[in-house]
Image (cartoon, helix red, strand yellow):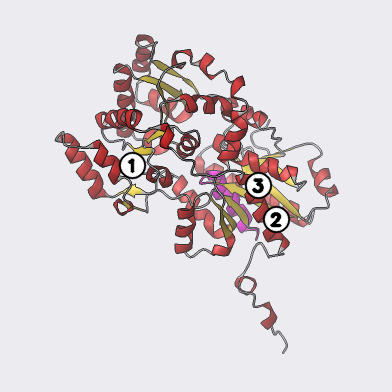
């Protein structure tokens, strides 16, 4: 496929022309978490015989991160925007290429596009711009993702107490539940915090995962009539993936983790992998855990692979693999979602800087350690199963991971994200469409002032 061209499936435009539907539900995907979380919506809209179109930006194109998951969830890509190059180029390409596609749908085929954007991704933050600039509004799935970060004074006390051997991890765990200890305003994860904040103004319907997200959206002056607490679509994806766990080859790929209490590790955040000091803290923490005979399964993602080579750690890593074959597994990300769910279900703890892993750990009742200074899934912290391990001191991270393994009981973890989420979202969207609202509204439409128009001379 030519990387400079948009790919459109054969017979696609003919099918659009033959459809008698007024609205086109456009499911936007780009990353592996996008595909997993948007799949249930794509399938639900298909079940309702709605006109649904799957648009892939091609941000994640690796076989393990895209192709297998698409096959796993029976998803057929209709349009591939085929973006490439540096992040700012990708940003502009999505706006341009998707914008052209939306305009063609509307002007040539008289369809009203409704893009469904997910979470805080680059694709969400550009698809909504392509829509907004052409007077189309979006459905924001998993709306209002904000990072809550413990305040400077909180961290300073933690670090100073730790240096003096005075840090009580029970107390640290307890203080993470105190909402007064947090602040908003972080740009981490970067650039996702920019992405999610920039989407809200073009959103026509907010599919909110948990109640406190809705409260804060209202505090930011967004219309409560346009939002509904529905849960998180990853629940629906996990329900399907659990049905396929019997097919999983995860423990054939990583046999030294079978029947063991192990930690499941992923690291890929830009701020963790592109900043040397932070990555070395994380790498050395994992190294110390391995040397203490903790069972560690570390799955390689592109950013961590790049950091390992950039900071000249490959030789040391290969030495660990050779020296600790019984308790250290390192390799590529698992291609299938059901294999990931198989592993994290059986893990003693998930240790990650991923936002989606924090949710998935909750749903399968596994404790979690977040390798960041804050969390954009703060509800998981306040639910007593996720701890923040700031990437500042490798010994502190080791102690927090060991604490989580020993002190968080799976039986006490409760699902935060409901069930049948995709059905609820589609129900709400179709209900709003039945009211014949203008999806994109200027103030005279938003405030229902049309009846007062008087243009007579």
Residue at left offset 47%, top offset 45% = 192
Residue at left offset 71%, top offset 35% = 76
Was residue 134 drawn as part of the magenta stretch in this picture?
A: yes
Q: What is the secondary structure assignment of the residue under circle 2? A: helix
| Of the image marks 2 and 1, the number of the one nearer the N terminus | 1
Residue at left offset 59%, top offset 48% = 117
Residue 423, disc: 3
| Of the image marks 2 and 3, the number of the one nearer the N terminus | 3
Give the CA separation, mark 2 to mark 3.
Answer: 11 Å
Res. 269 image quadrant? top left
Residue pointed to by mark 2: 430
Instruction: Give yes or no for contact between labels 2 and 3 (Cβ–Cβ under 8 Å).
Output: no
Q: What is the secondary structure assignment of the residue under circle 1? A: loop
Res. 89 image quadrant? top right
Q: Is residue 267 above or below residue 207?
A: above
Mark 1 burial class by Cα count in 10 Å: few <14, some 14-19, many 20+: many
The boundaries of the magenta stretch are: 119-136
Q: Nearer the viewer, residue 214 or 440?
A: 214
Q: Nearer the viewer, mark 1 or mark 3?
A: 3
Was residue 227 drawn as part of the magenta stretch in this picture?
A: no
């Amino acid at each position: 496929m030519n990387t400079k061209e948009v790919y459109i499936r054969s017979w696609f435009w003919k099918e659009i022309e033959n459809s008698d539907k007024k609205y086109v539900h456009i499911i936007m995907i780009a990353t592996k978490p996008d595909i997993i979380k948007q799949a249930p919506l794509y399938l639900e809209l298909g079940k309702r015989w709605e006109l649904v179109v799957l648009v892939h930006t091609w941000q994640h194109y690796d076989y393990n991160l895209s192709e297998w998951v698409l096959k796993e969830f029976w998803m057929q890509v209709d349009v591939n925007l085929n973006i490439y190059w540096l992040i700012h180029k990708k940003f502009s390409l999505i706006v341009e290429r998707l914008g052209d596609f939306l305009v063609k749908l509307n002007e040539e085929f008289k369809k009203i596009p409704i893009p469904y954007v997910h979470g805080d991704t680059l694709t969400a933050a550009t698809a909504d711009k392509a829509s907004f600039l052409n007077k189309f509004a979006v459905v924001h799935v998993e709306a209002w993702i904000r990072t809550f970060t413990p305040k400077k004074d909180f961290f300073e006390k933690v670090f100073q107490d730790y240096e003096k051997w005075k840090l009580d991890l029970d107390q640290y765990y307890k203080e993470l539940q105190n909402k007064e200890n947090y602040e908003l305003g972080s740009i981490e994860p970067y650039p996702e915090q920019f992405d999610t904040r920039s989407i809200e103004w073009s959103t026509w319907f907010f599919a909110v995962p948990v109640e406190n997200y809705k409260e804060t959206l209202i505090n930011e002056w967004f219309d409560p009539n346009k939002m509904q607490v529905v849960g998180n679509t990853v629940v629906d994806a996990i329900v399907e993936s659990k049905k396929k766990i019997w097919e999983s080859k995860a423990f054939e790929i990583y046999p030294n983790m079978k029947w063991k209490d192990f930690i499941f590790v992923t690291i890929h955040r830009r701020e963790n992998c592109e900043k040397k000091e932070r990555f070395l803290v994380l790498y050395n923490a994992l190294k110390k855990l391995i040397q203490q005979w903790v069972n560690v399964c570390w799955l390689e993602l592109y950013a961590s692979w790049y950091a390992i080579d950039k900071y000249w750690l490959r030789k040391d890593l290969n030495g660990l693999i050779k020296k600790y074959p019984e308790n250290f597994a390192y390799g590529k990300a698992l291609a299938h979602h059901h294999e990931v769910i198989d592993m994290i279900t059986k893990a003693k703890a998930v240790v990650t800087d991923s936002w989606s892993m924090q949710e998935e750990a909750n749903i399968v009742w596994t404790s979690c350690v977040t390798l960041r200074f804050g969390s954009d899934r703060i509800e998981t912290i306040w639910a007593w199963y996720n701890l923040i391990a700031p990437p500042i001191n490798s010994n502190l991270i080791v102690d927090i991971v060991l604490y989580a393994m020993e002190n968080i009981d799976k039986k006490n973890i409760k699902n935060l994200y409901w069930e049948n989420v995709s059905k609820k979202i589609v129900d709400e969207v179709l209900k709003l469409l039945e009211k014949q609202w203008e999806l994109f509204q200027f103030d005279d439409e938003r405030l229902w002032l049309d009846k007062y128009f008087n243009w007579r001379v």
